[in-house]
Amino acid sequence: MLLVRSLRLPLDAPCPEEQAVDRALKLLHLGRGQVAAAGVARLSVDARHGRPALVYTIGVRLKDEGAEPALAGSAPCVALARRAEYRPLPGGAPLEHPPVVAGLGPAGLFAALALARAGYRPLVVERGPALEKRVAAVERFFAGGALDEQANIQFGEGGAGTFSDGKLTTRIGDELCGFVTDTLLAHGAPPEIAWQQKPHVGTDLLRGIIASIRAEIEALGGRVLFDTALTGFQLKNGRLAGAVTGSGTIPCQRLVLAVGHSARDTFSMLAQMGLPLSAKPFSVGFRAEHLQADIDRGLYHAAAGHPALPPGEYQLSHHVGGRCVYSFCMCPGGQVVPAASEEGGVLTNGMSYHARAGKNANAAVVISLDGSDFGGDALKAVAFQRRLERAAFAAGGGSYAAPAENVQSFLKGQGRLTPGPVEPTYCRGVRPCDLGSLLPAGLADGLRAGLAAFDRKLPGYAGPSAVLTGLETRTSSPVRLQRGEDFQCSALPGLYPCGEGAGYAGGIMSAAVDGLRVARALIETSAPAP
């Protein structure tokens, strides 16, 4: 397929998709009779220069596909797109037992799907429950009930991404992203994820897609054991021989470790075994809430509210010394949610439904940390996160309410939360707090400098009604389990560290792609068990 990019049209253009296709064919010097199919491959909004414009990428497939390479590069905006083939060939010696996948977040889900499609009949162990039970537990907690440490926003079928905006944006640029998108579409994702510049599914639709993929894994001979936590490994002659769980030991020679960024007990187990863990970069901060209408005006100016425009999204950053303050996981029309997985800790996350119809916009505003902040010690980094979460719990009054204050108050260190147009959406309630007192002084001051810079870039960002709710501590895993070029842990052959929890991904798309890479490496070393 040929891709013709950067076709700009005004917001009020009649039949803009048809116009964009006509422009693409004119650039290619093609008549309609030469074309098998043509349509929107990507659509974005450019709001940088006054009135926003629609920017199309048009995909064109010729009846004579062999003629497409000659047209690639015929203009600077024309390129040839090829979807990556994902057909790993099995290795020689068959396994004695099916491979085990630990964790059913995006990385584990796609690793298990790839293994199942290749005939390996994987056995998946997931510490949390299936979606229906998990959703019920989360909703009880949101409504004021007790926290279930095994069924919450972090743990259970689908992983942490299930209760999010369902963003599919990524910077990894891997061809396997197309495979992930096609799989999601085949399992019921909305069709626009194929062409949006910033595709998202929404937590409401994502749940059904995850359950559908799991059903395919099971239909292909795979099995999923819910409420089954990985607690250790059985070794034989220095190699993996089994997965130890709370329900017993499962014999296996290959295990995909995709436990997610919050499996702190698993990280401790890995350290006790002497496996090569190191502290990796992550970030901490708050959730910033604004009226979505104010964000739209700041981005779209006089065009805000135009029906052709999606809810406004922003991405801001500012360097402070050797650190970076940046916005992360922006949720248009979303809500701030309690994301605790341990009793006595408060942390926040953002979530949006597919419609993104909420009154508020929210995003994490965080400052970067490096492994050197903890002397490279992964468990010290985990302990730092935990200390912040417990401080936030205490500041919220010990009932999973969250500490909060207005942005202007935080900039001045006043600890005030004044009622205004922005009503905090955190469902367990908020309490006024000097948020800066919950962080090391250097990090708090860095966040203040970053927020002041954001206000210069997006006027009104530090307006009088904007609210910060804290704390945001789990932007990514603080831990990396070292693996080699064969994707196996160098200290334990047969163990495949995978996804965000092992330190090799960040977000739904990159975690899913890493699951596919790891599955391919596993497949190419061995044949399915008889």
Image (cartoon, rainbow, N blue to C red):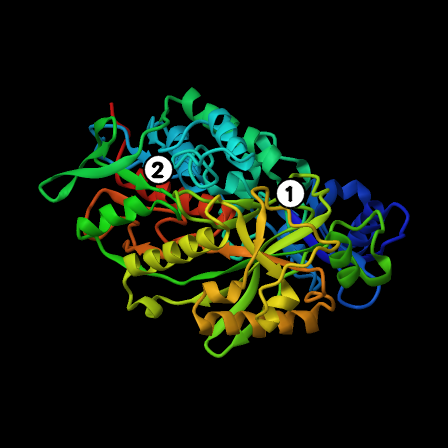
**Residue 294: where, in percent of width, then height?**
76, 58
What SS does tag 1 mark? helix
Q: Say which label, 1 or 2, has the lower sequence index.
A: 2
**Real-space Cα distance between discs 1 and 2?**
28 Å
Tell me which amino acid carries mark 1.
Ala
Which one is nearer the viewer's eye here, 302 or 347? 347
The residue mark sitting in front, 1 or 2, is 1
Q: Residue at x 36, y 60 (%)?
A: 384
Q: Is residue 218 above or below residue 372?
A: above
Is residue 155 visible from the viewing direction of this image? yes
Q: Which residue is the extreme one toward the front?
A: 397
Tell me which amino acid carries mark 2.
Leu
Is residue 175 visible from the viewing direction of this image? no
Which one is nearer the viewer's eye here, 64 or 423? 423
**Residue 494: where, in percent of width, then height?**
22, 42
**Residue 409: where, in percent of width, then height?**
63, 67
Q: Residue at x 23, y 56 (%)?
A: 276
Q: Residue at x 45, y 44 (%)?
A: 340
Q: Which mark is residue 89?
A: 2
| Residue tagged 1 | 194
Q: Quadrant of the C terminus?
A: top left
Going by the image, does 262 lie left or right of 137?
Answer: left
User: Quick one: label 2, few (<14), some, or many (20+) residues within 10 Å?
Assistant: some
Q: Residue at x 72, y 64 (%)?
A: 464
Q: Which residue is the extreme one toward the bottom?
A: 321
**Residue 391: where, in percent of width, then height?**
43, 56
Which one is nearer the viewer's eye here, 265 or 469? 469
Q: Is residue 47 above or below residue 37?
A: below
What SS does tag 2 mark? loop
